[in-house]
Amino acid sequence: MPQIKANAALQTVITTFECSPGTCQDLLDLLTQAYAEFISKQPGFTGAGLHVNDAETRIANYSQWATRDDFKAMLRTDEMRRRNREIAKLCTRFEPVMYEVAAAFPE
């Protein structure tokens, strides 16, 4: 389960996916499948959430990992590289960005 609190000893990653309303559900299905079958079973995985905007043109993914290296190791696996090629076909772009939680409310 993700924990949103400042100074947590976790690596937070927020990934945004830009897509069209016609591909949003297919992309969401691929992401859900990736988490269920592979990502959630990787070392250091803590939790994640997938969020879809009302227009179905963006998906935001909030995930947390024990360390930055755990997240990077997952991305470098052959399995995730293959899945990312499939994901890329359904969106115009996606970008994972690592963040530190600076503040959370209520804390």
Image: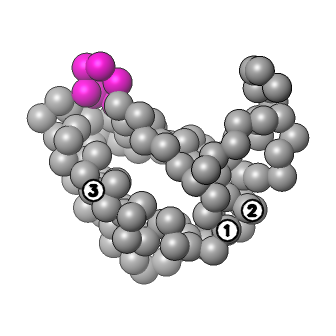
Residue lying at the far left of the rendered structure:
22
| Residue ID at (75%, 21%) | 105
Badge 3 element: helix
User: Going by the image, does 10 lie left or right of 7?
Assistant: left
User: Going by the image, does 90 lie left or right of 52?
Assistant: left
Q: Which residues are magenta?
A: 53-58
The image shows residue 78, relative to residue 35, as above or below, that is below
Q: Earlier in the sequence, mark 1 or mark 2?
A: 1
**Residue receiving disc 2:** 67
| Residue ID at (87%, 41%) | 7
Q: Position of residue 21 (x, y in %)?
A: 17, 30
Q: Residues within 10 Å of mark 3 (few under 14, many from 20)?
A: some
Query: How far apart are the alpha carbons under marks 1 and 2?
Result: 7 Å
Q: Position of residue 86 (x, y in %)?
A: 26, 61
Q: Which mark is residue 44?
A: 1
Q: Looking at the image, is mark 1 or mark 2 nearer the viewer? A: 1
Query: How far apart are the alpha carbons under marks 3 and 1?
Result: 21 Å
Badge 1 element: loop
Badge 2 element: loop
User: For the residue marked with disc 3, what is the amino acid?
Assistant: Leu
Q: Nearer the viewer, residue 96 or 43?
A: 43
Residue lying at the far bottom of the rendered structure:
78
**Residue receiving disc 3:** 30
Q: Earlier in the sequence, mark 2 or mark 3?
A: 3
Q: Position of residue 34 (x, y in %)?
A: 37, 63
User: For the residue marked with disc 1, what is the amino acid?
Assistant: Gly
